[in-house]
Image (cartoon, rainbow, N blue to C red):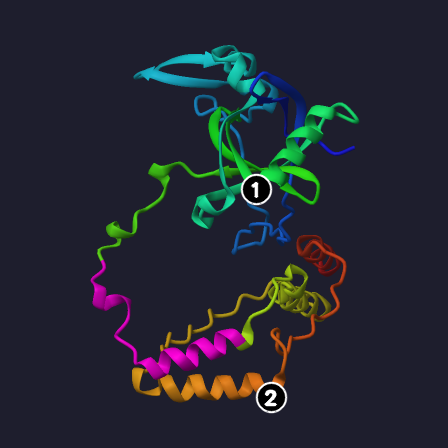
Amino acid sequence: MARYLWKGSLSFGLVEIPVGLLSAESPDNLHFTFLDRRDYAPVGYQRYNKKTEKPVPWEDVVRGYEYEDGEYVILSDDDFKRANPKTTQSIEIVSFVDAGELEPIWFETPYYVVPLQKASKAYGLMRDTLERTGKVGIARYVMKTRQHVAALMVKDGVLLLQNLRYAHEIVPVKKLDLDPGDLGRAVSAKEIKVAEQLVKGMSGKFDPKQFKDTYYDDLMSLIEKRAKSGQTESVEAPLEEKPIRGTRVVDLLPLLEKSLASRGKKGGAGGEERPAPKRTAKRRPSRTVAKRRTQRA
């Protein structure tokens, strides 16, 4: 059974739909163990009492708000719900907008919204209405002591709740302190025409399966190579970063024409794709290190 991150109801006017939120992302990250360079012992994050300097188990940890110097108001999980039961247990749709009105910069964490009751007619009504109207529901709800604003949309027949950033969290372009000249020089009509032809030749339907995390595979290959050769404690000097070079204005048109000609030889919108190396099962380098260290002892 999937673990719900949140349970409550989806409020659509007077309609209440019991739903749960499931994570809609699964980052493919490597998990590293922090080690002490001197003896390669693990470095951990320890919860400890700053007065007694003794470890504190999770069940004894509470949250307190310091309203005056050294004076705290203690809050339990139930207290956060009591502050406003409706907002902590409901995803309230406050309006509907056209999907095209939401720019990518607003999007944050995605969650699948699934019905807690099978064959929910209200859930199906919400999903089908959003699909037929092309609208996105703008909602608000509370999760983990914070109120979120979110966009409710449809993804492959399932409702998707996409958290949105608040307006004050977005840095306006005007605050970047850039002059018009910093954003590029004027280009000629011929350069624009060739660039448009290149874009047209590279255009196609977006296929997320086309893209692979090749850096993950390259990094895992390096780790496997180090582990097999016994280089489990070597620390190399950092690589020198190559200077970032841009394209000179005088070389722009020849590069565009060369790129366009190259695209014509390859054919197709996608072009040549680097074959993805066969992904091996995930391994925890820290265990390999510990095992080899034990054998040498």
Determine which of the numbered discs, if any, sits on residue 134 in the image: 1
Res. 229 image quadrant:
bottom right
Question: Vertically, is 177 above or below 14?
Answer: below
| Left or right, residue 125 beside residue 72 | right
Amino acid carrying label 2: it is Lys
Give the labeled residue for mark 2.
265
Residue shown at 60% from the left, 50% from the top: 33
Q: Position of residue 184 (x, y in %)?
A: 28, 71
| 3D distance between C-alphas at marks 1 and 2 | 40 Å
Residue shown at 55% from the left, 74% from the top: 202
- Which type of secondary structure does the marked residue at label 2 adopt? helix
Question: Vertically, is 99 above or below 234?
Answer: above
Which of the two marks, 1 or 2, is nearer to us in this view? 1
Amino acid carrying label 1: it is Gly
User: Viewer-proximal residue, 209 or 153?
Assistant: 153
Say whether residue 218 is magenta: no
User: Viewer-proximal residue, 188 or 83?
Assistant: 188
Quadrant for the N terminus in the image = top right
Say whether residue 190 is magenta: yes
Q: What's drawn in magenta, residue-wise?
A: 178-200
Residue shown at 41% from the left, 12% from the top: 73
Q: Are marks 1 and 2 in contact (CB under 8 Å)?
A: no
Whether residue 111 is visible here, answered yes or no, is no
